[in-house]
Structures are given as structure tokens and as C-alpha cells.
Amino acid sequence: MLVYVDDIIITNSSGQAISNLIAKLNAEFPLKNLGKLHHFLGLEVQPASNGGLQLS
């Protein structure tokens, strides 16, 4: 999980772990899912071949 002010990126190899965390956060805070991540804090975000994320 990466948090910057009111922006959060959640990633994990387990979709169930992500769903559980989002449910817990959503019980305390209003959340909005903006879909797949393309840009964050001025960085371009792309999927990496190893399953991670590449920032440029």
C-alpha cells in the first residue's frame, strides 16, 4: 500500500487480500475506485514483465 495525502495505491498478488483491505478501509472512510493505475504523482505507471509495476 502506498499512501500520499488522500491518494492510495493498493496492490498485492492476492486479489482476496486486496478485497479484504478495501472492505476494511471502506468501513471507515469513503473510497472511490478509479480503475487501473496509469499515472500517480506525475509518474507514468505500467505493468512490468515480472508482475510488478514500472514507474517512469
Image (cartoon, grey):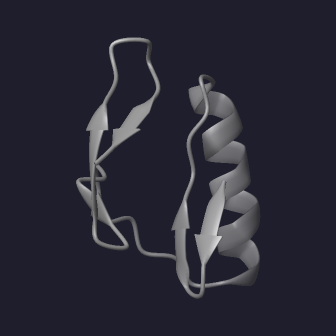
Residue appearing at x 76%, y 62% in the figure: 24
Q: Foreground: 53 or 30?
A: 53
Residue appearing at x 63%, y 57% in the figure: 22
**16 relative to 19, above or below:** above
**42 relative to 17, above or below:** below
Q: Foreground: 56 or 50?
A: 56
Q: List the single residue furthest toward the top.
A: 50
Q: Quadrant of residue 51?
A: top left
Picture coordinates of residue 48, whole percent (x, y): 34, 23
Residue appearing at x 59%, y 87% in the figure: 5
Picture coordinates of residue 39, whole percent (x, y): 26, 61
Image quadrant occupied by the N terminus? bottom right
- Using residue 2 as the reference point, say whether residue 43 is left or right of it: left
Q: Quadrant of residue 55?
A: top left
Q: Quadrant of residue 41?
A: bottom left
Picture coordinates of residue 14, whole percent (x, y): 63, 24
